[in-house]
Image: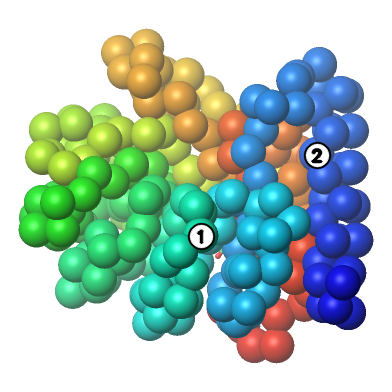
Amino acid sequence: MTDRKTELAENLARVEERIASACAAAGREREDVTLIVVTKTYPASDVRLLHELGVRHVAENKDQDAAPKAAACADLDLTWHFVGQLQTNKARSVAGYAHVVQSVDRLKLVSALSSAAGRAGRELDCLIQVALDAESGERGARGGVAPEGIEELADAVEAAPGLRLGGLMTVAPLTGPYAGRQRAAFDRLMELASRLRVTRPAANMVSAGMSADLEDAVAAGATHVRIGTAVLGVRPRLG
Ligand SMILES: *Cc1c(COP(=O)(O)O)cnc(C)c1O
C-alpha cells in the first residue's frame, strides 16, 4: 500500500472502532449507523483510495470542488452527499452528481433542486438541515432552518417532483442554548426527527456527528455520521 493509503486505512480503522464502541455502548447495531467520509479540500485520489478501502458514502460542502471530484470518480459506486450551504444557482450542478442533499433549509432551494433534478432526470434524497441556534423563523449561522420551519419544508419537499424527503440533519451549534452541549443538541434533533416520522415514516435518516462528537451522535440515535478530519487529517484550509 502507498503511504497515503496506509494512513487512510489506519484512520478509518480507528473511526470504525469508535463507531462500533459507541453502538455497543448505546445498545445499537453497528449496521444502523452509516459512515459518511467528508472529503472536502482533499483530492479525488483520496476518494479513490477510500473507495478501495471500502468507503461507499462521501460528502462535500462546496460545489466548485465537488463537481470535478465527482466527475473524476464517476466510475466508482459511491453515494455522494452534499452537506454545505447551497445557493440556488448551484442547484443544477449539484443535482448532476449528488444523491443526497443534506442541507435543504429554505423553500427557494426546494424548487431549485426540484427543477434541477427534473432536468437531470434524477431523484434526490433531501434532508432538512435544522439550525438549533436559530430563533423561530430565522436561519442558523451555519445554515439550517429553525425547528418551527421543518414542517413547511417537509411538505414542500414531499410535493416536489424529483425530490424525496429523507429526514433531518444538523451541525452542532457554536452559539445559542446548545453551544458546547452536543449530546443535548443531538437529543433535540432526534426528538424533532421522531415527530417528523409520525406522519412521514419513510423520512428516517438522522444525520449528526462529526469527528469530535460522533459518540454523542450515535448515543442520541443518529443514523448517519459525517467524518472528515478523523479520516483524512486536519484540513489544509478552512472548509
Ligand atoms: C466538514 C464537515 C463535517 C466533517 O467535520 P470534521 O470535524 O472534519 O469531521 C461534517 N459535516 C459538515 C456539514 C461539514 O461541513
- Residue at the (24%, 44%) spot, across then down: 123
Label 2 residue SS: helix
Q: Which mark is residue 19?
A: 2
Q: Give me the residue at 38% from left, 26% from top.
A: 203
Of residues 116 and 184, the one nearer the viewer is 116
Spatial CA span between label 2 and label 1: 25 Å
Q: Is residue 122 left or right of residue 159?
A: right
Q: Position of residue 214 (x, y in %)?
A: 74, 45
**Could you say where residue 122 lies in the image, as x and y percent from the top left?**
21, 49
Residue 237 percent across, percent down from the top left: 64, 88
Q: Amino acid at mark 1?
A: Leu
Task: Give the label, 2 or 1, closer to the camera.
Answer: 1
Residue 108 visible in this rendered orientation of the protein: no
**Quadrant of residue 185 within the rendered picture:** top right
As drawn, the residue found furthest toward the top would be: 198
Badge 2 residue CB within 8 Å of ligand 1: no
Mark 2 residue crowding within 10 angstroms, few (<14) / some (14–19) / many (20+): many
Ligand 1, image quadrant it occupies:
bottom right
- Asked if residue 76 lies left or right of residue 221, the reply is left
Few, some or many residues within 10 Å of mark 1 (<14, 14–19, 20+): few
- N-terminal of the pair, mark 2 or mark 1, is 2
Image coords of residue 61 (percent x, y): 47, 69
**Which quadrant does the C terminus fall into?**
bottom right
Q: Which residue is mark 1?
A: 76
* SS assignment at label 1: loop
- Identify the residue at horizontal 30%, vertical 13% (top origin): 199
Residue plotted at (25% across, 60% down): 95
Amino acid type indicated by mark 2: Ile
Task: Please name whichever residue, 107 or 35, is drawn nearer the observer in this view of the structure.
Answer: 35
Q: Is residue 3 above or below residue 18?
A: below
Residue lying farthest to the bottom in this orientation: 236
- One can see residue 114 in this view: yes
